[in-house]
Image: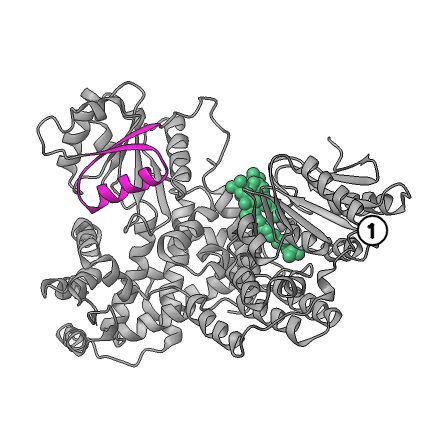
């Protein structure tokens, strides 16, 4: 293994090179080595200036996220940073790649900062449900002012080196390699006898009164439900109101609180799940992935054009083909494409025709993808002589806004085609989730369970506004009825038509969707669905719908009752968890994280709850099981029989993610 930190000397400059691939995260061994090497450089009488830089693709991308939440090991990140900051010899840091979180905090602890022109600098901790805990909330506002500190720390997005220079976060943008540029800068310091500058000795300026209050309002609107942004703000306020050392103590206390919080546990889980999800579970196939340099999208509707735009944005050559035009399917673009994505109407006959035609014209080795979520992909593939090349790519709509992309393997899809399609999704910036083709795939199937309960709750006594409020308060961006309005009633209407044969008598008779649809209230596009919408999109409850719901209950002989918020949340949420367990047990998806990614990136399940199965683990599966049993006793076994997988995991003392959490959070 290469040395983690190498010390070299050039004249009176000591250079510390960190080398811990892939991203130089400040894991314990690297911290310990850095501390040791720094002490060596400090103690070396020949060294007058110390330079810190990184080898590899990036400067330190932060603390080691895998260590967060575990017992801290000395030297911890703040220990190393304070050790460096206190040095009496000037310390220069040179950054390249992504200098993030604890990495950037370490840079703030140094006395002079440089960055390459293409470097990105930022504090993404808020996305992990924590705050910068290595002095960042105290040094940053002292260097760049409170407004910009809030932007960086509460917002979480990185800035460019040029911006960082303008803000005074760094001293210079460097050209070329970091080592020679940093060396030259260090020699200049020596030559000019530049005194060292400590950020901790500056004063944090509040540019205008009321800034914190403005940000609080912004957070409650844009980061509703998240705790970390408010704690970030509180820590930055400390930089204005407290001496540096006390500000650091405040930051440490808030950091400890957040790192131990359920929200941060969930957000860290999401970080790793997002990276794991597009790797195929199980042993990898030896066949190389197929290259996708050109794509033909069949279909000129909003789905087809949306998909084509995604490819174009990812700089992949793409053509939209109108299948109704003469030679449309047989055009040169289709013949030469590496991937053909069919996005015609959800009609089996039509899709089979398209695929039979593609089979004739496409080049050997081309991948043929269908966007269906509800039809049997095997039936689509069987009309071709290359069923191994056929795969499902189910995009959410609107395509540009929904990150979820289900990559469905049909019975004969070859592993390399499945893996290649997953990779394509990643290139598109989507969260591609591998699923086994199954009419309804995984996402629609789970959503259908939640919607079933939402509609039952309406006929039992709730109204759309109440159901939506409760689900939104849990952390979804929209409640189920507002979400149907946003997507358009058409898609749910179609799903019900296609699945009518499989529905129970109660589900069929609970036809509120059809009733609203029949009124031509197709959702936001018609400014009316389960709610009504003003010209500016403002949503309001509609008495006409409330009357329709009440009349529906009467016509079905159901005596309406008052439904509590707790019941609404329980039924919507546990329907999702239970079906998620079934989908997993049946092998429609291979891992609990697939279910969680589907819900977070497909349906807006709150990130800070980690997805339905992670959340179930946090509640504790015995608690989940008891709730399901109680629902079964009250509402019947038809829908509420606890998934056998939950029972089995409890017997094995496990959760969906392995060992059951030792201290389950309260419901
Ligand atoms: N800790 C541990 N592992 C990390 C890591 C980190 N900070 N950053 C990245 N990794 C791992 C990833 O999990 C991945 O591992 P895998 O190959 O086994 O899946 C590998 O490094 C490469 O990461 P990506 O696939 O994400 O590579 P990209 O090139 O797409 O992105 C990146 C690189 C921009 C650095 C991105 O990984 C990233 O955003 N990382 C997280 C940065 C972050 O959140 N830093 C703050 C950490 S918390 C902190 O610093 C606390 C402090 O205030 C005390």
Q: Residue furthest top?
A: 364
Name the residue nearer the viewer: 467 or 271: 271
User: Based on the displayed image, in which of its 4 quarters is residue 8 positioned?
Assistant: top right
User: Based on the displayed image, in which of its 4 quarters is residue 327 positioned?
Assistant: top left
Is 467 magenta? The answer is no
Is 299 magenta? The answer is yes
Identified at 70% across, 47% down, the residue is 93
The residue indicated by pointer 1 is: 89
User: Based on the displayed image, in which of its 4 quarters is residue 660 positioned?
Assistant: bottom right
The percent coordinates of residue 334 (x first, y second) are 22, 26
Q: Is residue 429 above or below residue 533?
A: above
Task: Specify whether residue 641 is in view.
Answer: no
User: Element at badge 1?
Assistant: loop
Task: Specify whether residue 533 is in view.
Answer: yes
- Near mark 1 (Cα within 10 A), the count class, few <14, some 14-19 or many ≥20, is some
Name the residue nearer the viewer: 572 or 150: 150
Q: Quadrant of the N terminus?
A: top right
Name the residue nearer the viewer: 272 or 5: 5
Q: Give the residues drawn in magenta, as a range.
A: 293-320
Question: Can you tell me whether the CB of the residue at mark 1 lies under 8 Å from the nearest atom of ligand 1?
Answer: no
Relative horizontal placement of residue 353, taking residue 212 as reference (left or right): left
């Amino acid at each position: 293994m290469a040395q983690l930190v190498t010390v070299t000397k050039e004249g009176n400059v000591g250079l510390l090179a960190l080398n811990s691939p892939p991203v130089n995260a400040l894991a314990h061994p690297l911290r310990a080595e850095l501390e040791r090497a720094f002490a060596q450089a400090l103690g070396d009488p020949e060294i007058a200036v110390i330079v810190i830089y990184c080898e590899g693709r990036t400067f330190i991308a932060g603390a080691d996220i895998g260590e967060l939440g575990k017992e801290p090991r000395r030297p911890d990140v703040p220990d190393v940073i304070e050790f460096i900051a206190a040095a009496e010899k000037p310390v220069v840091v040179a950054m390249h790649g992504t200098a993030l979180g604890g990495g950037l905090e370490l840079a703030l602890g140094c006395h002079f900062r440089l960055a390459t022109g293409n470097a990105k600098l930022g504090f993404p901790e808020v996305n992990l449900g924590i705050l910068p805990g290595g002095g960042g909330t105290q040094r940053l506002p002292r260097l760049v002012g409170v407004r910009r500190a809030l932007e960086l720390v509460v917002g979480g997005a990185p800035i460019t080196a040029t911006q960082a220079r303008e803000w005074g976060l760094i001293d210079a943008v460097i050209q070329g390699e970091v080592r020679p540029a940093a060396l030259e800068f260090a020699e200049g310091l020596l030559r000019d006898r530049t005194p060292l500058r400590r950020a901790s000795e500056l004063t944090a300026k509040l540019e205008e009164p009321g800034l914190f209050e403005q940000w609080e309002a912004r957070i409650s609107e844009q980061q509703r439900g998240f705790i970390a942004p408010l704690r970030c703000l509180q820590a930055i306020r400390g930089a204005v109101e407290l001496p540096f050392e006390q500000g650091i103590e405040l930051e440490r206390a808030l950091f400890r609180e957040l790192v131990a919080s359920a929200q941060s546990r969930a957000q860290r889980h999401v970080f790793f799940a997002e990276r794991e999800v597009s790797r195929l579970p199980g042993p990898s196939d030896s066949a190389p992935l197929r290259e996708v340099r050109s794509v033909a999208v069949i279909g000129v509707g909003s789905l087809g054009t949306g998909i084509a735009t995604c490819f174009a944005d990812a700089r992949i050559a793409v053509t939209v083909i109108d299948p109704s035009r003469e030679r449309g399917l047989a055009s040169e673009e289709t013949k030469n494409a590496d991937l053909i994505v069919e996005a015609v109407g959800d009609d089996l006959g039509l899709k089979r025709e398209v695929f039979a035609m593609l089979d004739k014209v496409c080049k050997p080795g081309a991948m043929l993808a269908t966007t269906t979520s509800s039809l049997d992909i095997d039936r689509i593939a069987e009309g071709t002589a290359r069923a191994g090349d056929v795969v499902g790519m189910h995009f959410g709509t609107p395509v540009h806004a929904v990150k979820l992309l289900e990559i469905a393997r049909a019975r004969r899809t070859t592993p390399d085609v499945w893996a290649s399609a997953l990779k394509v999704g990643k290139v598109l910036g989507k969260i591609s989730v591998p699923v086994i083709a199954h009419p309804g795939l995984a996402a629609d199937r789970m959503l259908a369970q939640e919607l079933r309960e939402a509609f039952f709750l309406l006929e039992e006594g709730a109204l759309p506004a109440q159901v939506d409020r409760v689900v939104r308060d849990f952390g979804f961006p929209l409640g189920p009825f507002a979400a149907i309005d946003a997507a358009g009633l058409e898609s749910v209407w179609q799903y019900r038509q296609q699945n009518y044969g499989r529905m129970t008598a109660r589900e069929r008779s609970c036809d509120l969707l059809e009733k609203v649809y029949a009124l031509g209230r197709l959702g936001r596009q018609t400014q009316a669905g389960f709610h009504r919408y003003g010209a500016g999109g403002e949503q309001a409850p509609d008495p006409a719908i409330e009357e329709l719901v009440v009349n529906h209950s009467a016509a079905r002989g159901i005596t309406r009752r008052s439904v509590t918020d707790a019941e609404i949340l329980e039924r919507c949420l546990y329907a999702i968890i239970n079906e998620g367990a079934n989908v997993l047990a049946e092998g429609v998806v291979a891992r609990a994280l697939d279910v969680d990614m589907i819900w977070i990136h497909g349906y807006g399940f709150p990130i800070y709850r980690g997805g339905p199965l992670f959340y179930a683990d946090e509640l504790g599966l015995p608690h989940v099981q008891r709730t399901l049993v109680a629902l079964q006793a009250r509402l019947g076994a038809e829908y509420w029989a606890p998934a056998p997988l939950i029972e089995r995991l409890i017997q094995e003392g496990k959760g969906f993610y392995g060992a059951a959490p030792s201290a389950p959070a309260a419901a």
